[in-house]
Amino acid sequence: MKRRGTLSASARRRHLRHEFDARVEQEWRRYGREPRRVLARTLRDRFLARHLARSTGLTLELGPGPGRFTPTLLRATRGRVLAVDLSREVLTRARAHVGRTGGARRVAWLQGAGEHLPLANRSVDRAILLGNIVCFAAKDGGHLLREIARVVRPGGELVADFATPAGATQEFLALVARRRQLPRILRRPRFYLIDGVLASGYQPFLPARLATWEFQFYTAADVRQALGRAGFRVRDAMAIAPLGWATDRIAASAIRDRRTWQNLLGLEERIGRRPGTLETGHGLIVSAVRAPRPRGG
């Protein structure tokens, strides 16, 4: 039986395309204002650069959005990049941004869905999925990961980030507190899906309850299991900003001085790899290697 609020795969993709077509500039600005979001973006960028340093071959970037991380791919790798996104509008924005930063000749742009890639088996050397792409696939996350595994060569790398139930709930409560809506939300936590998200990780599409996306959250164990089933082995995992995500105060204070900022980044990266922190902060990011054969179905 279909769960309430569950969209068909095609309906979910249409909804995502429509929403991101309409919010291109908002997506570009989203990680450039609040210090805590700058911190989260910078930590993703550093993780990506570290794992792609001096790599060659073809890199698939699924869901590049307006092109925030594409320049990092071009700086870190020596090969070509194929950027695939559902939204034509964000691809146009990304192409313009990359054109200003250089390296545009090494990027091919394609509008399409990650669940149905027009690529041959084992045809790319690595895949980058940032922006909670697997989470937005909701109940089709396993299908998406298997499709990525199909096109990545054995020994190739996957870098992906995942939203966690605890981290997302913390962000939601902080947001409604800033909007002075917290008492209303906490009087009816079940109505606003807080209990359900923490228990199952699943958020149905119920706009009247502030759930404007169908979304699947992942614990650290969920990530390893989902990647393992698709044929990937996790080799590095890090919580994103477990110290500075909860409040702007830490990041805002550190960002004013270069040395202080660098020390905070290093501290976040060390704490982010400690046991018990992977489900805190602004989600988690992983590097995984493509096994010779998928594990399980």
Image (tube, grey):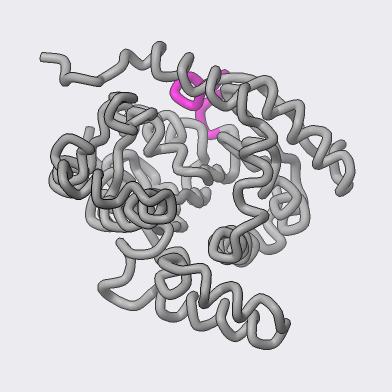
Q: Quadrant of the N terminus?
A: top left
Residue 286 percent location from the top left of the image:
43, 57
Q: Main secondary structure of the magenta part?
A: loop
In the visual, does 186 lie left or right of 291? left
Residue at position x 29%, y 51% in the image? 182
Q: Is residue 13 above or below residue 63?
A: above
- Work out whether residue 181 or residue 76 is closer to the camera in this orientation and state it: 181
In the visual, does 21 lie left or right of 177? right
Magenta residues span 113-122
Location of residue 33 by image quarter: bottom right
Residue at position x 39%, y 64% in the image? 281
Residue 216 percent location from the top left of the image:
30, 37
Q: Is residue 58 magenta?
A: no
Q: For residue 183, say whether it is visible.
A: yes
Residue at position x 43%, y 55% in the image? 178
Q: Is residue 124 above or below residue 178?
A: above
Q: Residue furthest left?
A: 1
Residue at position x 33%, y 33% in the image? 210
In the visual, does 224 lie left or right of 28? left
In the visual, does 191 lie left or right of 136? left
How many numbered marks are there? 0
- Work out whether residue 154 or residue 283 is closer to the camera in this orientation and state it: 283
Residue 195 percent location from the top left of the image:
14, 45
- Work out whether residue 170 or residue 270 is closer to the camera in this orientation and state it: 170
Residue 112 percent location from the top left of the image:
58, 19
Q: Quadrant of the C terminus?
A: top left
Q: For residue 237, say whether it is visible.
A: no
